[in-house]
Image: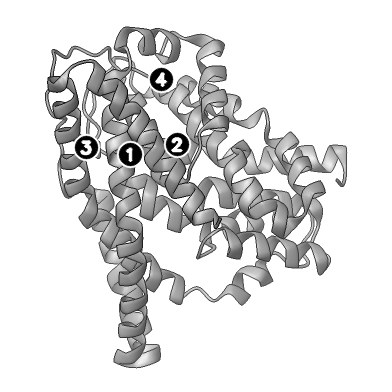
Amino acid sequence: MSAALLIDILLWGSVLGVGLIAFRRGPPVFKASLREGAMDFINIVPRIALGVIGSGYIAAIIPQEVITGWLGPDSGWLGVATAVVAGAATPGGPVVGFSIGTVALKSGGGVPQVVAYVVAWALFAFQRVILWEIPFMPARFVWFRCAVSVPFPFVAAAVAMVIGKP
Amino acid sequence: MSEPSPNTPAPAEDSEPRPGRVRKPIGWSTIIIAVLVAVSAGLVWRRDGTDGVLDILTHDLSLFSGILPRVLAGCLLGAFISEILPHEKVSRSLGPKSGLMGLLIGTAFGAILPGGPFTAYPVASALLAVGADFGATIAMVVSWTLIGYGRAVAWEIPIMGTDFTLWRIVISLPLPVLAGALGRFVYVRMYPKPAIKDDET
């Protein structure tokens, strides 16, 4: 069974599960949430469309080699800072992000820098923020969440420097 | 679901059925993204011509149609959850006064949440709507992205290896709680009374 199919089964299974709970609270509750969900969907579709189509163009003007180059030789805190920017600017999904991390590790990038890169990618990767987080969450929450997350790739790199390699 | 309602973290005051949340279709975020997209598309056009622009468009349109059912599922999930969760219980265990426990609950919830971004963000948004505060919700989102097992199992372990992944997750373990605590600390200072400011930046 493919991973995508498994995810879809899990996803629609959860929808069915919570839908059933709502239905047992009575048809009005069920109908109200169904209407609310449908309205959310209608409202979100244009943003998702802008996000999907738009991030394709943004990704197309950021060559992967640039990102890989940023993760290169610079060790120390400057290297960590570049790694954080690189993580946020990495286009594409998890395959691209983790592959760049692996390439950096194999080609002599420092472990703390790669950790900072992976953590920054998980926290800030622009495509996920544009495509998923901004359409679904209140915009104020997204900016706030990103702002307070800024220190943490650095914290992770510092911990990696202290405790050493895996 | 998309716009900060002035009383986002405030206790729910709803009757049943819940009044529809206020939505503003176009905010500053959308405008910024649209401008970025237009500039990028222009650069692609200059570099690759009309064909380049159309290539990306067709590819992304097929991606978009593939994503849509999941987006619908995510929206329904969020709507059902915000309808069936007991609001007073949520604001007690995840609200502004929930303390370290609330951050830990948010972290645990984010770590075990199945699915991808199409479940995590609608669910987080639903929590926010029924009384969780920014701190606990930040802990949940950060935990989902940093220590959630879904992406680690599907992508990180196969590509980066088990050793690196587990080690990276161990380093990341305290981060969701710290991010949530920092979020709460900053939030009460930026918005001393809930609902003072509701513009989106």
Q: Nearer the viewer, mark 4 or mark 3?
A: 3
Q: CA distance from mark 4 to mark 3?
A: 34 Å
Chain identity of mark 2: A
Q: Is residue B102 left or right of residue B130?
A: right
Which residue is painted at 82% across and 66% down in the image? A106
Q: Which residue is mark 2?
A: A145
Q: Which residue is mark 1?
A: A137
**Is residue A94 positioned above or below B79 on the image?**
below
Q: Which residue is mark 3?
A: A37
Q: Secondary structure at mark 1?
A: loop
Chain identity of mark 1: A
The percent position of residue A60, horizontal first and vertical second, equals: 44, 76
Chain identity of mark 3: A
Q: Amino acid at mark 4?
A: Arg
Both marks 1 and 4 on one chain? no
Q: Nearer the viewer, mark 1 or mark 4?
A: 1
Determine which quarter of the picture holds residue B66.
bottom left
Q: Tell me which numbered mark, 2 or 3, is placed earlier along the sequence.
A: 3
Both marks 3 and 1 on one chain? yes
Q: CA distance from mark 1 to mark 4?
A: 22 Å
